[in-house]
Each structure stands twice: as structure tokens, then as C-alpha cells.
Amino acid sequence: ANAALARYLGDRNVNLHLVAHQVDPEFLNRPNIAVHLVPRSFGSDALGAWPLARRGRKVARDVMARWRDPHVLVNGGNCSWPDVNWVHFVHHAWTCVDRTGPAWVKAKDRMVNAWGRRQERRAMQCARLVIANSDRTRRDVIERVGIEPGRLLTIHLGSDPGWRPPTAAERTAARARVGAAADRPLAVFVGALGSDQRKGFDTLWTAWRRLCAGSDWDVDLVVAGGGRTLRDWRQHAEWAGLAHRTRFLGFTDRVFDLLAAADVLVSPVRYEAYGLNVQEAICRGVPALVSADAGIADRYPPSLADMILPDPNDAQDLAARMIRWRSDIDGWKRRIAPLSDAFRRYTWADMAATIVAAIERPSNGLV
């Protein structure tokens, strides 16, 4: 999302400064874009947060001194500045669930979360405009962070119109790449496998074992995502005798191809400010079972209500919904087609244009 906004501004010859740990190489050699890279200490986001915020404020001060009426946009608690805050995650809305992690990881997660809450409250309180990526995020910012509704605006994430349902040839090639049998349906999970159980893979795994115990369950599962517990989950699959039914890819940048092979995406998240993986799946014509705790669930029409999981901890309900999907695979694909079209029509450029219009609006225009 940040890259899409930067690309939109860069293509319009706006003088742009990017402060980040890393950026896409396309921004490194453009004359109107200055990139300020801030290394992560020991590769840690937590240790890199303070230097990032400090550099962000320094660059903002320099820009304010050199240019007339510049705008400064920050993300969440990354940096405090009294202009625009674009929120992609709300620390106040999520407390880490790390039942399986070592004690030091649990302590670190709680410390980072507490620090993140303090930073995001300070940053959002000083912002004149707060942009939320979903209605769920907007509610969280109001109810949990205490920001007045008059300073808040919801702007959904855009999409790439090229992420459309695959052709038959693309699907065949994609299934061959992931080792999927031509005659077996394929379920996909896309998300990090860290000690924090926010993505809900443990719920999917419980449901998956229950489903695979039935002799008539002919679906295979591909899991895309790296993290601290990836090796543990692979071992669980071996111990359960399900390694032949479950493939763990680890981190991959081939999600576009993976979704071409998929028949359903499963995302039983316990918290998700938006859910770009779900949007991308639907754009590719893949039905997505998603928790009501994800911001994107607010964009599902009533006709797709049975694709929304009321409780991300209820593996039995998830298994039952997957059985209903399996009994009507083609019907589920037809039902999501209108939402797929709507998502693709609202592009990243549309999102960026909406953000720019909101930023340039007079400060009292939201009230």
C-alpha cells in the first residue's frame, strides 16, 4: 500500500521523501524521490523502531524548512508528526497469543506490544487526519485509542487489476508448480507462522486434522508463510501422518501463482486490520473463508455471510464450513464473482488518489 502511494506521487513528479527500513528498488534512482534508509539493528523491527521515528522527524523538519505547505504522512506509531497518520495496524486492538513460544519470546512480544501502544496513541493524538484501512480499524482507533471520529477517514486498500481469475492454462501450470494433483481440490493458507497465534493457523490445523480423519475428505492443503514455528508445524504434520496432505512452502513471493492453483483460501485470523491476502484471493476468483475479526470482512455482502467465521477459535465450525464449500466448489466461485469484480475495479491508483484528495482537503473538511 505504501509503495502504491509512493508510485502514484512519483509518477506525478511530486517531490517525495521516503523514510523506511527498505524500499522497492524502483524508487532508488528517481530524480524526484529521495530515499532515507534506516537499518534495523540486528535485523529487528523492534530495535529499529526508535531510529526510524527519529529519522522520520528529522526529515520532516528539513522538508518543512525547505518547502512551502508540504505534507507529512506516517504509519501508525512509527513516527509522531502533526499531519497525516495512515493506520495499517492497531496495537491497542491485539494482545499477543503466544502459548507455545519460549519465555523470552513471550516477554519480548508483550514489551514490544506495550511500547507500540504508547507510540501509536501519541502519534494518532497529534495527527490532524487519521486514515484507517478499514471500518474495523476506524472503530478500533475510536474505541481503543480514543481518537475523535471527526478526524478519521476510512480508505480501503486498492488492488492490481491484473490479479484476475486465472486462465485454464495458468491454473494448470500453477498447480504443477506447487505439486497439486490435478484431480484434488486445494485449500491455501497465507500468513506468517510466528509464536504469536494471531493468524489462526492453529485453529485451521485442528480443523484440518478432523477433516482428514474422514475417508471422503479429498482436499489437500498448501501453507505459505515463514516464521519461528514453521519447523514445528512441519513436524506436527509428520507426526499426524498428514505430510502427504499438507505442504509448507515457507516464505514465498509467488502468492499470485499460488492463488491461481487454489480452490479456497482459509484465514481464521484473531485480529487483522484489513486482510490483503483475502482481497488478493478474491481478486483471483478464489473464495475466502475469513474471520469476522478481519477488517475486510466488513466488505463482504450479506450473500457471503456463510464465508465469515464468527469465532476464530472454533475449529469445529471452520471444519463444517469447509465441508459446505467442498460440496459446492463451483457455486462458491460464482457467488464471489461480483465482489471480485468490485475489488479489481478499485485500483491502487484509485486508493492513492483518494488519499491525496483527503490530505489536500482543508483540515475542517472532515467534521
Image: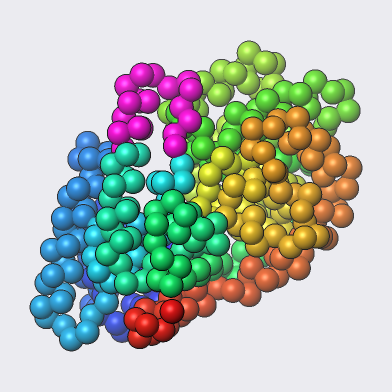
Q: How is the image coloured?
A: rainbow
Instruction: From the top left corner, tell me how far across and down residue 209 is, in percent.
Output: 72, 23
Q: Is residue 129 above or below residue 51?
A: below
Q: Is residue 70 above or below residue 252?
A: below
The answer to which of 180 and 140 lies nearer the viewer is: 140
Residue 304 shown in magenta: no
The answer to which of 221 and 180 lies nearer the viewer is: 221
Q: Is residue 25 visible?
A: no
Give the residue at x 22% y 40%: 47
Give the residue at x 32% y 45%: 116
Give the residue at x 67% y 39%: 311
266 sits to left or right of 146: right
357 sits to left or right of 134: left
Instruction: From the top left corner, tell me how far across and down residue 134 is, in percent.
Output: 53, 61
Instruction: From the top left corner, tell me how far across and down residue 297 is, in percent.
Output: 64, 55
Residue 106 shown in magenta: yes
Q: Residue furthest top?
A: 239
Q: Is residue 70 above or below residue 76?
A: below
Q: Identify the magenta region.
A: 95-112
Q: Is residue 352 visible?
A: yes
> Quadrant where the C terminus lies?
bottom left
Number of numbered callouts drawn? 0
Instruction: From the top left corner, tell me how far across and down residue 42 is, in percent.
Output: 22, 36
Give the residue at x 82% y 32%: 218
> Quadrant where the N terminus lies?
bottom left
Quarter location, residue 26: bottom left
